Image (spheres, helix red, strand yellow):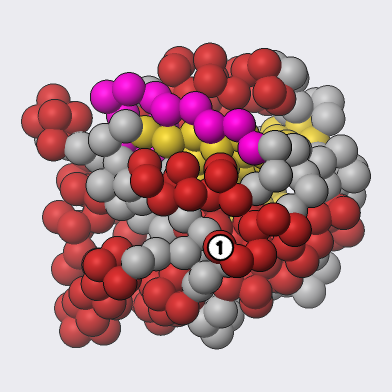
Amino acid sequence: MQALRSRDGQLTAVQTGQGPDLLILHSLLTDRSAFDPVLPALAAQFRVTLVNLPGFHGSAPIPAGIEGYADRVATVFDDFGLGADCIVMGNGFGGTVAVAMALRHGQRFGKLVLSDVAAGFPEQGKVAFRVMAEKVAAEGLGGIVDIAARRVFHDAYLAQHPEAFEQRRQVLLGINPQAFIAACQSLIACDLVPALGEIRNPTLVVVGELDAATPPVLCRQLAAGIPGAWLSEIQQCGHCPPLEMPAAFLDTIREFIGL
């Protein structure tokens, strides 16, 4: 696995595999390691680039605003030499960044895979981001371990995998606290729903049936708004299918990406 850094030094990433390009953007409460269970299968067919979003694991933080995240991540197409047929795959917050990229830089890449992604949150959904931002400001990232674990995974999974709490702790401690707050603020302010009809990238929306962080109704709204988008639901799965149910996730995306 090759370590990468953007020309201006602001973004870090890793790259592995050979073939057509596949760019992966992780969620707010995970990091790029959330895709480790599916990475061998993907890298067998694609040159996979996993970006650390701003403020995560060596990538420089940026001010709040989903457009700024989209513009910052879009620099990787030139900096890392990603082709115009590159598939962009995002989970959670990374998927929302990918939607903003499709609106602002959609001509730079091809297909779009959005796993458990919202284009905007209702007021009830924004409360969780406000609570997490406030707790991080007061207690640091270690203060939201329980919240994070229960937003990434559903209760049945956590009962079977109690080690997931410690795994979330280690992931969270690798994030810049101010960057985490900025990401929460970006999701609170984000409303890309009215512009979804402008997206021209072929799109597959995947959702875990039991996702508490991005409920399926928001994923259905996303798929309905993007012209020609497909929607696929993974049963008995939470917010991060590549991590929780990797085999089912691969089966779901296989035909769409040509795996």
Which residue occupies 45% across, 45% down?
A: 219
Q: Position of residue 45 (x, y in %)?
A: 74, 19
Residue 171 located left or right of residue 246: left
Q: Quadrant of residue 250?
A: top right
- Amino acid at circle 1: Val
Which residue occupies 9% across, 30% down?
A: 159
Q: Position of residue 171 (x, y in %)?
A: 35, 53
Q: Which residue is mark 1?
A: 193
Which residue occupies 60% across, 51% down?
A: 225
Which residue occupies 89% across, 43% down?
A: 83
Q: Position of residue 38 (x, y in %)?
A: 52, 25
Q: Is residue 11 magenta?
A: no
Q: Quadrant of residue 153?
A: top left
Depth order, front residue of 218/38 = 218
Decide: is 248 above or below 176. Answer: above
| Classed neighbour count for the residue bearing mark 1: other residues with Cα under 10 Å, few (<14), some (14–19), many (≥20) | some
Depth order, front residue of 164/130 = 130
Decide: is 219 above or below 172. Answer: above
Residue 205 located left or right of residue 159: right
Please report the bounds of the magenta region as a residue range.
Answer: 229-241
Q: Secondary structure at mark 1?
A: helix
Depth order, front residue of 198/59 = 198
Where is the C terminus found, in terms of image quarters? top right
